[in-house]
Image (cartoon, coloured by chain):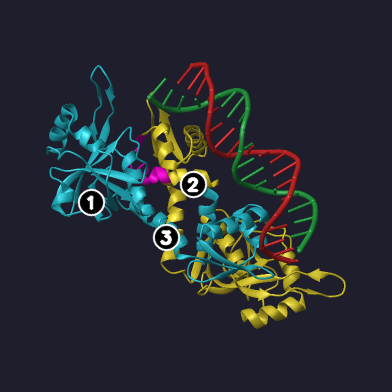
Chain colours: A yellow, B cyan, C green, D red
Amino acid sequence: MKGSLLITLYQLAVIGALRNPIFVKTTKLKDFMGVSQQSVSRWLIELEKLGLISRSVCGKGQIIRITEKGAEVLRELYVNLGRVFGSFPDKLKFRGIVFSGLGEGRFYTSIPHYRKQFIEKLGFDPYPGTLNLKLKGFSDIEVKKVLKLIAGIPIVGFYDGVRSYGGAKCFKAKIDGIDCAVILVERTHYGDDVIEILAPVSIRDTLKLVDGSEVEVEVYVGNN
Amino acid sequence: MKGSLLITLYQLAVIGALRNPIFVKTTKLKDFMGVSQQSVSRWLIELEKLGLISRSVCGKGQIIRITEKGAEVLRELYVNLGRVFGSFPDKLKFRGIVFSGLGEGRFYTSIPHYRKQFIEKLGFDPYPGTLNLKLKGFSDIEVKKVLKLIAGIPIVGFYDGVRSYGGAKCFKAKIDGIDCAVILVERTHYGDDVIEILAPVSIRDTLKLVDGSEVEVEVYVGNN
DNA sequence: ATTACTATTCTACGAGTAT
DNA sequence: TATACTCGTAGAATAGTAA
């Protein structure tokens, strides 16, 4: 989301558009926001198109209210800042939908060089294959993005003389009481809306999961 | 402040740059932020120039920490969102430095049409002249900007056949226990860093203020 | 008065690349 | 590798103005 729109939404919230509809004029808002009347007008239109505010222009101004979708965006900002000014949590939660991959996980977990590192660093011999989870919610994808950035348990890549094997990063995790690990592979064909799970057992079998099942994962991120 | 910079600062905070220096690479941050490596680089440089982060580039990345000034910006954001998701306060506080104006206030308060409205709507006959306050802090100027936007006690303008007299907006206030009012004149030559105060007595004399004295003002904004 | 369209200016993004 | 420079250009911001 564009910065100017987020700031506009925030400023509308500050002047009360979250609780009640407010009457504003772009000619007044321009002073508050330090831009031209035309830019304010454009941003309000864009916010409306995104469904973040509702708007009705009425002659000498317009009545604006932040929608629930807009409130979500601000709440997320608020919650994250709360974490920052409080303490960074030592575990993150997200939900994902089980789906079948292309066997890539099974391939990697069977390679001795990787397997050795998993046993040493994660404390378990991984069941061949990974549990693939599709992230649906905005905040679930945020968790993945945060994991991509913070330091985890490094799995180093190597070169066997024929091809190179990329590195990865793990975080210890738990699904329904089962110890496991989130693995973020450096070079993957999956997008940001997918997370892979390593475990000492088949989570699919143990928890009787099928494609489409929803699971909650607790990831331990220590005191980063 | 530019939206992209605020968002960058926020995202750095989310990944922990507020509490500790963090090691980051623009090549990794670009994925997290959804922009090019070049933009991330530019924004980090701009944030450093503004004194919001401190930075040391070291070969394969850079160590970044949000400065106290940067933390202030985020704290302000956090506090305001807290107000939004909690309840809007019924009074705002700001601090200002007393300075001498050009007698404009004395002129206006002496005009019967205005004076009548002050007596009716504010409940006191104003001492001729206004107390001019220069706002120094970022949040003090924010208060002024919020006051400009929300509804207050309207003072309507008029035309006496020769010239037109502009409107204004008042908020009941208190300085050191003295009942007074903040007045925001529609057409003023003062900028956003100045606020004028009306009171039934000379606040300068009563509180023995001189140019350069700092005062704290409580403004009552009701339940807007 | 407003809002918001169109035309124009110009900023800021990202590709390419030096270091 | 990484950061961060130059530069062409897309798209954002504003001026002018219609409604």
Relative placement, left or right, of A91 versus A203 is left
At label 1, which amino acid type do we have? Glu
Judged from the image, the secondary structure of the residue bearing numbered disc 1 is: strand
- Name which quarter of the figure residue A192 lies in: bottom right
Mark closer to the observer (1, 2): 1
Identify the residue under disc 2. Answer: A6
The mark found on residue B218 in the picture is: 1
Chain under callout 3: B
The one of B202 and A163 positioned closer to us in this rendering: B202
- The residue drawn where x is 28% and y is 23% is B164
Identify the residue under disc 3. Answer: B72
At label 2, which amino acid type do we have? Leu
Mark closer to the observer (2, 3): 3
Residue B19 in the image, given as x and y percentages of width and height: 48, 70
Residue C9 in the image, given as x and y percentages of width and height: 61, 33
Question: Residues in magenta?
Answer: A11-23
- Name which quarter of the figure residue A152 lies in: bottom right
- Name which quarter of the figure residue A83 lies in: bottom left
- The residue drawn where x is 28% and y is 21% is B163
Residue B71 in the image, given as x and y percentages of width and height: 44, 62
- CB atoms of marks 1 and 2 within 8 Å: no
Chain under callout 1: B
Is residue A14 found inside the magenta-colored segment of the image?
Answer: yes
Residue B17 shows up from this direction: yes
Neighbor class of circle 2 (other Cα within 10 Å; few <14, some 14-19, many 20+) is many
Mark 2 vs mark 3, CA separation in Å: 19 Å
